[in-house]
């Protein structure tokens, strides 16, 4: 059981309960960044700037700065670094690293 529970993502059931993670943990920040990547910008009516531009048909290399910038806005407790690695077959793999900052250092604005 977690001290400050939050539903895990992707949503799943463990036993008879939904899986939970600790709020404001590294796992929570990683899940929040993953959710951010699942939304194409403009698809959430209540918050149209949430998400990233669909990179499906972008020319390589894909600009990963948008993900880092969006994460800074919507997941401020996380530091996100996206690295792109070209593959021999002409495709590209993007690795996303998420770390959480010390919550005691954050200031309310």
Image (cartoon, rainbow, N blue to C red):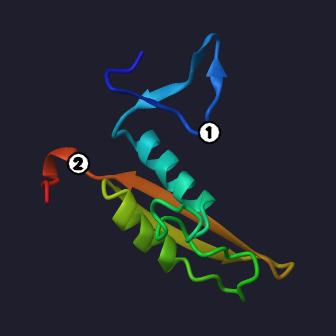
How far is disc 2 from disc 1 in space, using C-alphas? 25 Å
Examine the image and state in which quarter residue 96 appears.
bottom right
In-image side of 51 versus 6 (left or right): right
What residue is at 50 percent from the left and 70 percent from the top?
67
- Of labels 2 and 1, earlier in sequence is 1
| Residue located 59% across and 65% down the image | 43
Q: Is residue 40 above or below residue 34?
A: below
**Where does residue 70 sit, x and y in percent of width and height?**
43, 69
Image location (x, y in percent) of residue 31? 51, 46
Q: Quadrant of the N terminus?
A: top left
Q: Which residue is mark 1?
A: 10
> Which residue is at the far front?
45
Q: Secondary structure at mark 1?
A: loop
Neighbor class of circle 2 (other Cα within 10 Å; few <14, some 14-19, many 20+) is few
Q: Nearer the viewer, residue 95 or 12?
A: 12
Q: Quadrant of the C terminus?
A: bottom left
Q: Are marks 2 and 1 in contact (CB under 8 Å)?
A: no
Element marked by disc 2: loop
Picture disc at residue 102: 2
Query: Which of the 4 image quadrants contains residue 17?
Result: top right
Q: Is residue 94 left or right of 33 when viewed as pictured?
A: right
Mark closer to the observer (2, 1):
1
Vertical arrangement, residue 1 with respect to residue 62, above or below:
above
Pick the residue in front: 79 or 72: 72
Residue ID at (79%, 77%): 91
| Residue 51 image offset from top left, x and y in percent | 53, 65
Q: Is residue 95 left or right of residue 78?
A: right
Q: Position of residue 85 (x, y in %)?
A: 66, 75
């Amino acid at each position: 059981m977690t001290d400050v529970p939050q539903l895990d993502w992707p949503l799943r059931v463990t036993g008879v309960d939904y899986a939970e993670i600790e709020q404001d943990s590294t796992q929570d920040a990683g899940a929040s960044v993953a959710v951010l990547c699942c939304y194409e910008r403009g698809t959430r009516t209540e918050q149209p700037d949430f998400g990233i531009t669909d990179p499906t048909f972008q020319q390589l290399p894909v600009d990963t700065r948008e993900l880092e910038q969006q994460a800074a806005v919507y997941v401020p407790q996380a530091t996100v670094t996206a690295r792109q690695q070209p593959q021999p077959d002409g495709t590209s793999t993007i690795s996303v690293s998420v770390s959480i900052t010390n919550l005691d250092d954050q200031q309310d604005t």
